[in-house]
Image (tube, grey):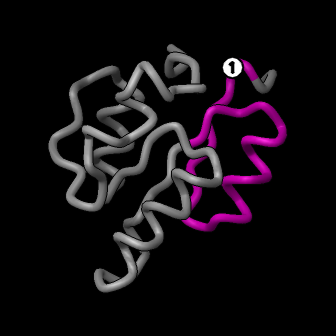
């Protein structure tokens, strides 16, 4: 699988940086991050280059299936690079 055909799912900033550095579209997943740390981690994952940040595996599945996300409590859709065409550097989720 080429980087252009792959998707990485990471909960660590180092993992996001590694995947993004390899040219892989990356989803930050907060499922295993303690609730009090989620907002800060979501911001760090976005800053590291995550194309989207989710709170659960169900939201990851929604993204991969092309469905509208249910809710990203740790993500402000108005400022999320994945939803803001002015700042987005990601590509479409591979089919």
* 62 lies left or right of 48: left
Residue 32 sits above or below residue 45 on the image:
below
Find out whether residue 92 is within the magenta segment.
no
Residue 23 sits above or below residue 58 on the image:
above
Query: Residue at (25%, 24%) from the top-left corner?
Result: 67
Location of residue 31 (image quadrant): bottom left
Residue placed furthest toward the left: 70
Q: Give the percent coordinates (x, y) of residue 32.
A: 42, 74
Residue 14 sits above or below residue 18 on the image:
below
Query: Residue at (17%, 47%) from the top-left corner?
Result: 71
Q: Nearer the viewer, residue 8 or 23?
A: 23
Q: For the N terminus, give its image quadrant.
A: top right
Location of residue 8 (image quadrant): top right
Residue 11 sits above or below residue 3 on the image:
below
Give neighbour class at mark 1: few <14, some 14-19, many 20+ (Cα, 10 Å).
few
Q: Give the percent coordinates (x, y) of residue 10.
A: 58, 57
* 94 lies left or right of 74: right
The count of marks equals: 1
Query: Residue at (45%, 57%) from the top-left corner?
Result: 29
Query: Residue at (38%, 27%) from the top-left corner?
Result: 84
Q: Mark 1 points at which residue?
A: 5
Location of residue 21 (image quadrant): top right
* 92 lies left or right of 85: right
Q: What element carries label 1?
A: helix
Magenta-colored span: 4-26
Q: Give the percent coordinates (x, y) of residue 24.
A: 71, 33
Q: Give the percent coordinates (x, y) of residue 28.
A: 50, 53
């Amino acid at each position: 699988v080429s980087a252009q055909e792959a998707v990485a799912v990471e909960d660590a900033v180092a993992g996001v940086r590694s995947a993004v550095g390899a040219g892989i579209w990356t989803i930050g997943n907060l499922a295993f991050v303690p609730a009090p740390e989620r907002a800060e981690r979501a911001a760090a994952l976005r800053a590291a280059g995550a194309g989207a940040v989710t709170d659960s595996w169900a939201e990851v599945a929604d993204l991969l299936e092309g469905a509208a996300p249910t809710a990203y409590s740790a993500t402000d859709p108005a400022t999320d690079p994945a939803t803001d065409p002015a700042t987005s550097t990601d590509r479409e989720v591979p089919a």
